[in-house]
Image (cartoon, coloured by chain):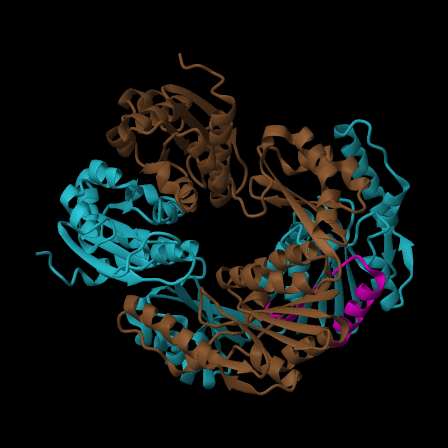
Chain colours: A brown, B cyan
């Protein structure tokens, strides 16, 4: 089946946002074994949107549209799709009542805000459409079928689009495929993208069925093995030798072979297995590391408290870093990271404490410790190890690299133990 | 002038990489006052590439292509462009000698690598093309002019494309533009997208030059006013009446009229103006609020410490929430939020403290306080106000809404003062 993506929104054409939806949906299409030939972005313009949709409808079997389903006059995707496929728009009572409760909840938080009439536009549905309830917003997803062709309309915000696609569209499309696709994920941390690619070059060259494809994520590399066969069992069997080979090559750097498992989930699971509790002391990452841990539902079992000690005063007062350390070595130093980890563990009473301190820029930094220098400490049951990192890029990029590194470092320390004993 | 972008590369269609080139080039086109109507991604397939380029050439004045200029057989962009415009491909001696020296330098750093014959393909240039020397790679940029139309070919890697565009294509296109564009941003928080849209419906209906366009961001709405005129001064002047009108309508909800200013920057600035320091106590947001504040370079001037008190024990131990409060009211309660804000302020010594506690789900929550219930507290110089919110959506979505709400609430409390005096 030939697939095609259309993203609708003038904000993408103006460069206000990066089109991450297309990257996500492209990966999903590859996973589903769909041949994706085109991605198009078109603005909130009726004529151009209609032309783009008509052309896609002629040349492709599955058209996935994102955006343009909102309540405003700019939002035209559903209207144009209905006209193109000669469907009438009718109010769907189920969707109307869902919108009603969603907006009531919204109003509770936003005193003075009104439910405006244009919201009900989102309850209009083309005749015969399959309606996909949106748990994270007001505009539902819609599937329009016509013979062997399908037009799928999804809201633009990734927080609404991704859950809708994952939970409703993906299973729907999978069931339409003649062959069964089995896809096996291998998630790697602690090795750079180009090194991973070099180490699997022979496997990529020799690939057939299954295929192997690398996806670079911030601080991680994901390898996807995909096989086609008549049954899931047969397809799964095809992926096995390659999975074994990757495990042999990357060992402990593989933190998961599960599709949806995140690095923070792997870390929280490891803490649970080891029956250890965690605390965090963050300077330059400013709470972003704790926020990653709290992403994991049930993190409370292993994580109780974190400290954002952004000032020197806070480092001294809340996690007992020595005044002399800050004076002689500075807040961005091996010694400060060590004391932060030790102090955080002591103050919180947790088994493990990870600390992060560094220069994220654009200002700060010294000749010896330029912007991008980050110290990550890990204290496990009284022993502490500190690692010095040098990251490149913007303030934002340095901070997010530091967060991923801290998670990787914590994982390594827990698996391999601390190498350097504390003096 | 109507512009159009075409990205060439199967790796984008497979979702292996995010198409950041298009976001960059779109923003540049907007800055140049070009009307960008389409972005297309097409794979390394001759037939589909040719169709896409032919259609673009018919409907647009400026076509910017990225990718497909490399040395391999897959790289077809230049060949297809030459055929489409009936130009012969000829070796450009200047480009050949540039490639030669580039590859020699590369070989010095990569022992064992050979200069393969296919590299010379990159020295072939369509007759009459303007050649743009690439300082960061072997494939030059190319401009093909035909009457008032232009086809611009750039290499795909952003590290080569961006410098080429910035230094050579941008000035080239700017000189071709008859009018100057001026764009004025208005950033609004604390009101939903559809309400903003309703309140400016008359302005949207009446728009001409300048235009006005809304962009929904998580928890915010951005309005962009754009005017065209003979000079920047004249264009800027055209935007003034609309800017005044929006200020009159949205008042304090406008947190900035600067293009690049974020909500957290506006909050940090306000703290600086009021000479106040901030501390934060987070439960369900788990440090994400602190991380937003630390996004701002120079936040250290107003922000010293934050506490992630995820467990009840941490709430009691680190920010002095009463045992009885947690027992009788629970950790997700008006009273707990109040004590967290007061305690955090006391312990940190800051002037202002914001607290967040809630049920982010998927588990937790009670009949009276379902998942999505979040209390946000703000303590300013001893007085505390607490707001109860009800958010919808996934754990991730509830947490990110809570973060934006907390920033907005802090801003409102600082601007308007606390309404409810503490009993």
In-image side of A397 versus B149 (left or right): left
Can residue A260 be seen in the rendering of this structure?
Answer: yes
Q: Residue at x 36, y 28 (%)?
A: A331
In-image side of A136 versus A198 (left or right): left
Query: What is the quadrant of residue A62 in the picture?
Result: bottom right
In-image side of B105 versus A159 (left or right): right
The answer to which of A334 and B269 lies nearer the viewer is A334
Can residue B176 be seen in the rendering of this structure?
Answer: no
The answer to which of B423 and B78 lies nearer the viewer is B423
Query: What is the quadrant of residue B294 in the picture?
Result: top left
In the current view of this chain or complex, which residue is farthest to the top? A423
Residue B141 percent location from the top left of the image: 75, 54
Residue A393 percent location from the top left of the image: 54, 41
Q: Quadrant of the C terminus of chain A?
A: top left
Residue B114 percent location from the top left of the image: 85, 33
Query: What is the quadrant of residue A323 in the picture?
Result: top left
Quick check: B420 above or below A365? Answer: below
Q: Which residues are magenta?
A: B32-59
Q: Residue at x 68, y 54 (%)?
A: A31
Residue B419 percent location from the top left of the image: 15, 63
Q: Residue at x 43, y 45 (%)?
A: A296
Task: Please state the total of marks drawn on the protein image.
Answer: 0
Q: Quadrant of the N terminus of chain A?
A: bottom right
Q: Is residue A343 magenta?
A: no
The answer to which of A198 and A28 lies nearer the viewer is A28
Q: Is residue B46 magenta?
A: yes
């Amino acid at each position: 089946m030939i697939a095609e993506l259309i993203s609708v929104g003038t904000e993408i054409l103006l460069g206000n946002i990066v089109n991450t939806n297309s990257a996500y949906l492209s990966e999903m299409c590859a996973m589903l074994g769909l041949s994706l030939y085109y991605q198009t972005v078109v603005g909130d313009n009726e004529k151009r949107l209609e032309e783009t949709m008509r052309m896609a409808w002629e040349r492709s079997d599955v058209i996935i549209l994102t955006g343009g389903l909102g309540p405003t006059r700019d939002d035209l995707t559903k209207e144009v799709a209905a006209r193109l496929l000669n469907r009438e728009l009718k109010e769907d009572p189920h969707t109307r009542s869902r919108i009603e409760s969603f907006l009531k909840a919204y109003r509770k938080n936003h005193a003075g805000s009104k439910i405006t009439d244009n919201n009900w536009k989102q309850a209009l549905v083309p005749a015969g459409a399959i309606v996909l309830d949106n748990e994270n917003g007001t505009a539902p997803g819609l599937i329009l079928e016509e013979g062997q062709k399908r037009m799928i309309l999804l809201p633009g915000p990734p927080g609404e689009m991704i859950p809708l696609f994952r939970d409703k569209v993906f299973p729907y499309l999978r069931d339409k495929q003649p062959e069964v696709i089995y896809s096996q994920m291998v998630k790697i941390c602690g090795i750079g993208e180009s090194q991973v690619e070099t180490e699997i070059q022979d496997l990529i060259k020799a690939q057939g069925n299954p295929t192997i494809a690398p996806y670079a994520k911030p601080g991680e590399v994901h390898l996807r093995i995909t096989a086609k066969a008549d049954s899931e069992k047969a397809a799964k069997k095809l992926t096995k030798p390659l999975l074994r080979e990757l495990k042999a090559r990357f060992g402990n750097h593989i933190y998961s072979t599960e599709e949806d498992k995140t690095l923070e989930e792997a870390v929280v699971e490891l803490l649970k297995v080891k029956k250890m509790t965690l605390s965090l002391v963050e300077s330059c990452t400013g709470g972003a590391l704790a926020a990653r841990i709290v992403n994991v539902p049930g993190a409370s079992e292993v994580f109780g408290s974190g400290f954002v000690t952004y000032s020197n005063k806070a480092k001294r007062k809340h996690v007992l870093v020595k005044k002399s350390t800050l004076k002689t070595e500075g807040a961005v130093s091996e010694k400060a990271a060590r004391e932060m980890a030790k102090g955080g563990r002591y103050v919180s009473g947790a088994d493990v404490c990870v600390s992060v301190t560094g220069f994220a820029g654009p200002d700060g930094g010294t000749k010896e410790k330029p912007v991008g220098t980050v110290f990550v400490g890990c204290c496990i049951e009284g022993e502490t190890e500190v690692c010095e990192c040098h990251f490149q890029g913007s303030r934002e990029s340095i901070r997010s690299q530091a967060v991923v590194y801290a998670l990787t470092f914590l994982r390594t320390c827990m698996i391999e133990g601390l190498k350097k004993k504390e003096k």
